[in-house]
Image (cartoon, grey):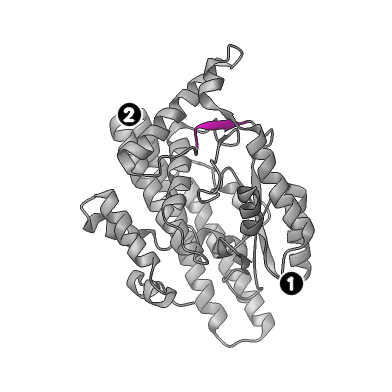
Amino acid sequence: MRRLAALGALVFVSGCASLEYYAQAVGGHLEVIRLAVPIEERLRETDTPEPLRAKLAKVLAIREFASRELALPDNGSYRRYADIGRPFVVWNVFAAPEFSVKTVESCFLFAGCVSYRGFYSEEAAQRHAAALAGKGYDVYVGGVAAYSTLGWFSDPVLSTFIQYPEPEVARIVFHELAHQLVYVKGDTMFNESFAATVEDEGVHRWLERQGTPAQRAAYEASGRRRAEFVALMTKSHAELAAFYDRPAEPEEKRAGKRRLFAAMQEEYRSLKASWGGFAGYDRLFERGANNALLASVASYSELAPAFRGMLAQKDGDLPGFYAAVRELANLDKPERDARLAVPSR
């Protein structure tokens, strides 16, 4: 009962959330937990398909590596498997004003304020997004393959990502376990950039020890594409933020906004050509690029270079790095931002 109450406190938005939102969040997560079966049990079952059996065995190896080699929490998370029968576990709705790249935040008692609101139903997410769009906001709905309950529950491996390439599965496990290690209420950029740094370092170490040359080459190529894409989005984010800060009439701002987004998408087409036509990021633009999309990408990556620098200062010692990050986490946000050189908005 304590954990059920804790989940309710985690998802309830004081003064903002409806009972309907509260119910879908609690019910959706409890359904995921209900479906979770110990991986060891699935491995013993004779009717487990061989491809799934191999994937689950590999996940257990990744999970052990996370605690043994990366000093990530050693608990019940990612030791069970849930087949949830849909492509994503939740759909996050991001919203930003027409002339701003700062997201509208939702505030939760335990998680603090975050830059999105999550739904276990795509239909419900799209309804919420449509309501926000009707109020003039730019909106972006993104499917999510995994999430962290920050240690309140033993988070399971999900069918949403078990079929990903091995390095991508490792990325998710390392990322979500990092959230259990350090999490600052109300600072999405800090939390996501820290977890992204841990996942990247973790996958490199995993592949050094366990990967094949082909896997390492593929992951390096994927990393270069990801870095180039994030650099484009970050540059566009900064350009739009500067543009919106200038005094101008609404129609002038709309015209400039269209021009800057068109330029960004043209640069993206050039990037795709340099990648040999790789189209892995196309889905982000299915409904058109806007402020909310840019803000969603920035929240996951902007501070990663600062965290990588901190890890380098510790000569790659992860426990020492985590201790330094915890010190930052205990600071007030203005001082933390100053230490990390967070750009002003």
Say which of 237 and 73 sits in front. Answer: 73
| Mark 2 in CB contact with mark 1 (< 8 angstroms) | no
Residue shown at 28%/50% (left/top)?
Answer: 319
Residue shown at 66%/35% (left/top)?
Answer: 34
Query: Is residue 70 shown above or below 59?
Result: below
Residue shown at 67%/61% (left/top)?
Answer: 12
Q: Residues within 10 Å of mark 1 (few under 14, many from 20)?
A: few
Instruction: Determine which residue is flagged by label 2.
Output: 210
Q: Is residue 80 magenta?
A: yes
Q: Which mark is residue 103?
A: none
Q: Secondary structure at mark 1?
A: loop
Q: What kind of residue is marked 2?
A: Gln
Q: Is residue 194 magenta?
A: no
Say which of 164 and 76 sits in front. Answer: 76
Query: Is residue 294 shown above or below 272?
Result: below
Residue 165 placement (x, y as % from top left): 48, 32
Is residue 328 in view? yes
Q: What kind of residue is marked 1?
A: Gly
Residue 150 placement (x, y as % from top left): 51, 51
Q: How many marks?
A: 2
Q: Which mark is residue 136?
A: 1
Q: Secondary structure at mark 2?
A: helix
**Is 19 left or right of 72, judged from the image as shown?**
right
First in sequence: mark 2 vs mark 1: 1
The majority secondary structure of the magenta stretch comes to strand
Q: Nearer the viewer, mark 2 or mark 1?
A: 2
Magenta range is 78-82
The Cα–Cα distance between marks 2 and 1, rounded to whole angstroms, is 50 Å
